Structures are given as structure tokens and as C-alpha cells.
Image (cartoon, rainbow, N blue to C red):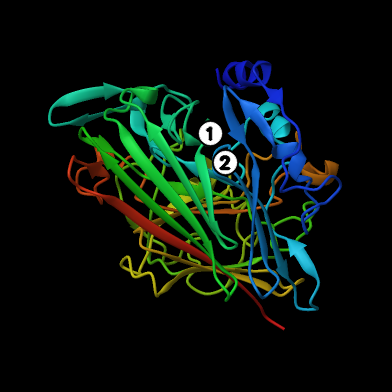
């Protein structure tokens, strides 16, 4: 179904000439050609937006899915590295259905059995993942064209109206996502939404981080710290069971820096079997305090450190278990198994069907607000 949808978009794709902002032959620092993103999809223009700061950091974003295409940061030797996976053109993003770098909505992660209720009204959604709804459905926010405004050299504002009934979700939902690149090499993402009918909202970013800045490099040796005493276990369909369990004494304990690959293939631990590795939500200890570090990811090889801050109560740590060596990414490099990790800030999966968990319900007159910061530094 997803492939048919993207094929339909590809059939309607019209290339337009380079705009005046992008001189022919000029590439971004990450090696992207801006004209490969300047096109028209279903009557809406797409582009590549380049954010920079005085420290020399560069972030490239396209308004197709609000995707982060590249992030250039210095390593411990001062060499710039691109630390996210993605593609070289809009055509590639259409031809290869994926979530690389995308804004995920209306609901990040899974909704059990593709159904939920609000005020005794039942809503049925497309089932696209083991009988459940994943990441807003086949036509989630990762597929839409956001309206974009480059507010400053370091600020991009994206807006989108998700209409009542889109992918089965109720209410006209006005969404705004703002990317802000700070002088301290911190990329701030601010999510806002308002609705005219009770609905559910759970927005996140699905960047695939490669901390070596080398897409051929495995994630095995990267050190992860998750400030979480608990996690939400899953069944064999990747659906949360409703339990909240301690990480103590299990391979889910990342409270101190631990190599991603140290325990990932432990076949004696059912949760790693169910998830085919790490693909779980952790219950953060930070209490929604944006000033507290929720997670840290570090490459001993490059010295690049990523600290994640969020107002959200949970974080999905996904270790690239379904990367199969079939996606040819930037610069023609094929993305192999577990060559990246995702750190998706969120409410817990299937919260609409688990009433004791943090609510994702948004009602008219309320404003959905969420904030996440990806801050980069080096450890020499």
C-alpha cells in the first residue's frame, strides 16, 4: 500500500528549474545539490533549506515530510561529519519509502489494532504494521508537503493542515514545526498543533543518527546513556503490553554509558527477541524538564556526542534492526543492518488505548506543544 502511494506521487512529479537562491553547481557542505530538491509534487513546491550557525554547523531540511536530510558537525579532530542518514534528492525520498529524518504524525509509534475511542466514539485507522497503525499510517506526515518559511539563517518554520478524516484521524489539525539551530550546536525542534474536534496527537522526529559520520559503520560501539529506570515491554507484534517494568538487571539498563551492541543479540531476553533488538520505549526520569539530559549518544571513534533534551515523558530507542541493505542513500552508499540509531521523543506507544498512560488527546481550545533538542559536542 505504501509503495503504491509513493508510486502515485512519483508519477505526478514535475521538475522545475533552479531558483535564484541556488547557483548552478553550488553544493551544501554535506554535498547536497539544492536543485535536486527544487521540484513540484502534487502541485506543491519542494525545496532544500539550509540552516547554519557561526560555529560552522549545517543542517539541511526538505519540506517533503519535514525531513532532516543532513547534519554536519565537527569531530574531535575538527573534521566535519554528516551524522544522519538520508537521500540526495526528492525523487529518492519518493522512490524509497522510508521515515529517514521525517516529522512523524499524527501519531508517532503504534496504535494497537488500528483503533481508539474518544468520548465513546470509535475511530478506525489504516493497519500498516503487524495489524497495528504505525507512524500515522501509510500517508502520515512523512509523506506530506509542508508549507515552509525560512525565518532566518538558523530558523525554518513548517506548517501543515491535516484535514478531518486524514488517515482516519478526527478533526482538522493545524500543525507547526519549527527548527532552530543555536550557536551552541543545538538543533531545537518545537511542535505545535490545534484542532477543531477531539483527536490524538503524538509528534516526533525520525532521524537516523550515525555517530561515526560514516554510513558504512555499525552502531555496535557507540555509547548510549538513557536516563530511565523503566521501559514499556512489547509483544511479538511490537505492541506495548500495558506493563511498565524496571530496567534493573536487564539488557534494557542504559543508565550508565553502555555500548549499543553489548547485549543487543541476547536471545535469552524475550524483549530483545520480540523487538529483533532494541525497538522499545523508555520511561524517562527527566519529568518533562527540557533542561535535563534525557539521553546521550557518543562515538568513541569520532568523539562526537549527542545530548537529547525533551519535554516528552518517553523515548523510543530503535537500533536499525530492520535496515536490510536495500536503501541506497546519500553519495550512493547502501545503508546496511544497524548502521544508525533513532532516538524518538514521544508519549508512550498506544497511549490512546491505555488510559493510565500520559494522554495524547487534544481538544478544541487546547494547544499541543512539545519540544526536543539535539545538542552536539565533541569529547576529545
Would residue 38 be visible to someone looking at this image?
Answer: yes
Above or below, 260 relative to 140:
below
- Viewer-proximal residue, 352 or 5? 5
Above or below, 276 relative to 264:
above
Q: Quadrant of residue 5?
A: top right
Would residue 125 be visible to someone looking at this image?
Answer: no
- Helix, strand or loop under label 2: loop
Residue at 13% over, 31% down: 119
The residue sitting at the left extreme is: 119
Mark 1 crowd level (few <14, some 14–19, many ≥20, 10 Å Cα): many
How far across and down, in percent of the image, does residue 251 sit? 52, 60
Residue that mark 2 sits on: 63
How far across and down, in percent of the image, does residue 331 sit? 83, 45
- Helix, strand or loop under label 1: loop
Between the C-alphas of marks 1 and 2, the distance is 6 Å
Residue at 41% over, 29% down: 133
Above or below, 189 relative to 164:
below
Numbered circle sitting on residue 283: none
How far across and down, in percent of the image, does residue 152 sit? 55, 61
CB atoms of marks 1 and 2 within 8 Å: yes
The residue sitting at the bottom extreme is: 380
Residue that mark 1 sits on: 145
Instruction: Please identify the quadrant where the C terminus is shown.
Output: bottom right
Answer with mark 1 or mark 2, whichever residue precedes in sequence. 2
Residue at 84% over, 41% down: 332
Q: Quadrant of residue 51?
A: bottom right
- Viewer-proximal residue, 29 or 20? 20
Amino acid at each position: 500500500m505504501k509503495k503504491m502511494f509513493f508510486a502515485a506521487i512519483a508519477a505526478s512529479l514535475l521538475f522545475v528549474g533552479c531558483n535564484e537562491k541556488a547557483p548552478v553547481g553550488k553544493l551544501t557542505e554535506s554535498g547536497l545539490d539544492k536543485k535536486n530538491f527544487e521540484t513540484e509534487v502534487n502541485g506543491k513546491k519542494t525545496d532544500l533549506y539550509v540552516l547554519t550557525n557561526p560555529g560552522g554547523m549545517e543542517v539541511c531540511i526538505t519540506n517533503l515530510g519535514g525531513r532532516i536530510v543532513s547534519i554536519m558537525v565537527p569531530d574531535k579532530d575538527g573534521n566535519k561529519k554528516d551524522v544522519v542518514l538520508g537521500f540526495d534528492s526528492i525523487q529518492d525520498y519518493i522512490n524509497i519509502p522510508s521515515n529517514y529524518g521525517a516529522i512523524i504524525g499524527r501519531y508517532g509509534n503504534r496504535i494497537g489494532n488500528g483503533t481508539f475511542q474518544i468520548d465513546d466514539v470509535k475511530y478506525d485507522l489504516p493497519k500498516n504494521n503487524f495489524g497495528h497503525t504505525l507512524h500515522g499510517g501509510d500517508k502520515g506526515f512523512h509523506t506530506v508537503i509542508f508549507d515552509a518559511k525560512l525565518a532566518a539563517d538558523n530558523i525554518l518554520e513548517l506548517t501543515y493542515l491535516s484535514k478531518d478524516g486524514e488517515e482516519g484521524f478526527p478533526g482538522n489539525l493545524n500543525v507547526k514545526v519549527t527548527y532552530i539551530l543555536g550557536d551552541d550546536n543545538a538543533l531545537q525542534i518545537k511542535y505545535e498543533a490545534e484542532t477543531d474536534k477531539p483527536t490524538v496527537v503524538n509528534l516526533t522526529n525520525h532521524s537516523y543518527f550515525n555517530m561515526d559520520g560514516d554510513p558504512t559503520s555499525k552502531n555496535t560501539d557507540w555509547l548510549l546513556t538513557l536516563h530511565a529506570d523503566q521501559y514499556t515491554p512489547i509483544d511479538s507484534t511490537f505492541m506495548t503490553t500495558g506493563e511498565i517494568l524496571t530496567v534493573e538487571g536487564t539488557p534494557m539498563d542504559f543508565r550508565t554509558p553502555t555500548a549499543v551492541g553489548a547485549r543487543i543479540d541476547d536471545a535469552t531476553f524475550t524483549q530483545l527477541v520480540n523487538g529483533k533488538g532494541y525497538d522499545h520505549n523508555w520511561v524517562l526520569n527527566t519529568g518533562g524538564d527540557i533542561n535535563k539530559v534525557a539521553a546521550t549518544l557518543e562515538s568513541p571513534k569520532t568523539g562526537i556526542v549527542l545530548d537529547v533534551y525533551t519535554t516528552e515523558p518517553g523515548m523510543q530507542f530503535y537500533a536499525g534492526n530492520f535496515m536490510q541493505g536495500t536503501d541506497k542513500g546519500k553519495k550512493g552508499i547502501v545503508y546496511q543492518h544497524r548502521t544508525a540509531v533513532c532516538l524518538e521523543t514521544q508519549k508512550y506507544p498506544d497511549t490512546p488505548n491505555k488510559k493510565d498512560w500520559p494522554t495524547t488527546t487534544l481538544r478544541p481550545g487546547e494547544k499541543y506543544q512539545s519540544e526536543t533538542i539535539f545538542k552536539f559536542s565533541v569529547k576529545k
